[in-house]
Amino acid sequence: MVAANVHPPQGAAADWTVPQRWSDYTPAEHAMWDRLFNRQAQMLPGRAVTEFIDGLDVLKMTRPGIPDFEELSDRLMTRTGWQVVAVPGLVPDELFFEHLANRRFVAGRFIRNADHVDYLEEPDVFHDIFGHVPLLANPVFADYMQAYGQGGLRAASLGAIDNLARLYWYTVEFGLIRQEGKLRLYGAGIVSSYGESIFALDDPSPNRIGFDLQRIMRTRYRIDDYQQSYFVIDSFEELVKQTLEADLAPLYRQLKQAVELDPVTVLPDDRVFYRGTQAYAQAKLAQG
């Protein structure tokens, strides 16, 4: 969640946090959460990674209505030491990393309206809480998120935030994982989207490529539509080992000289699970 403004908005603390004001949510806003939750909860079993489904249960997120961040944080703290804090919108890079490094997940408190059920450019409370928080109940993924925040602070000092942002995008937001011989979803941007939950696994259009850290950090991404390529990890443990347990400074130096890749690109040495037709992206391009 990145903002251009470096000063906290009016009413926010210096770290950009604000009260959630759970009691201010209207019945219509709670109903929107329930509508979105029920739609995803019905279609994700067998498609999402089991750790995500387990997280919904252990955090008691199956209860109706928008979760109260304080209650959710109490349950999450008991599991992995994380808490959820409300912010009014996108926050600056380094502050975002600092929150993660201290096991605080920043979440928007507003929820989309009926005109934006299927797509919203700025993340809302459903994307942030339903999409991200269940996996924070998993100790390995919770450690990954903290290590990502710590790595972000180092990347900022090395001028490599763009490279690290691509890692976040293609893992935390739009990652796939192999589990029990099948590709499954774990990225928050996918599991919180009905359309992309289907597209990412079933549609013939996108590439599905094995995870490679340098490759991902070279690859641009789309923020306005479904992804043209998804990257597949073998396990959360392997993700931690490959990305954040090593000194990335030499890699950042190499990347400064490397050619950036378009989202559609498939390289000769890629481990390709499925080479997409790109029919969806081409059709959207033809529409103008």
Image (spheres, rainbow, N blue to C red):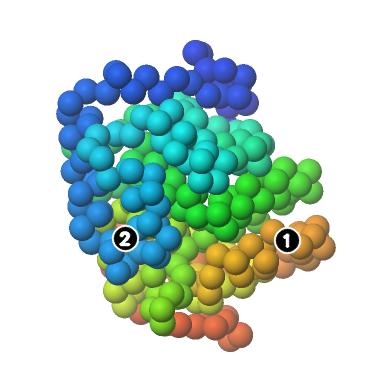
Badge 2 marks a residue whose secondary structure is: helix
Q: In which quarter of the image is residue 40?
A: bottom left
Sooner in the amino-acid sequence: mark 2 or mark 1: 2
Please provide percent x and percent y for residue 240: 64, 62
Residue in the image at 18% along x and 43% along y? 35
Q: Is residue 229 above or below residue 189?
A: below
Task: Characterize the local packing of mark 2: few (<14), some (14-19) or many (20 or more) Cα atoms within 10 angstroms.
Answer: many
Q: In this view, does 93 lie above or below 188?
A: above
The foreground one among 208 and 46 is 46
Disc 2 residue type (three-letter): Glu
Residue in the image at 47% along x and 63% along y? 175
Q: Is residue 64 above or below residue 211?
A: above
- Does residue 124 appear in this view? no
* Residue furthest out toward the bottom: 268
Please provide percent x and percent y for residue 168: 56, 54
* Residue furthest out toward the top: 11
- Does residue 70 appear in this view? yes
Name the image quarter holding the C terminus. bottom left
Badge 1 marks a residue whose secondary structure is: loop
Residue where numbered disc 2 is placed: 196
Residue where numbered disc 1 is placed: 245
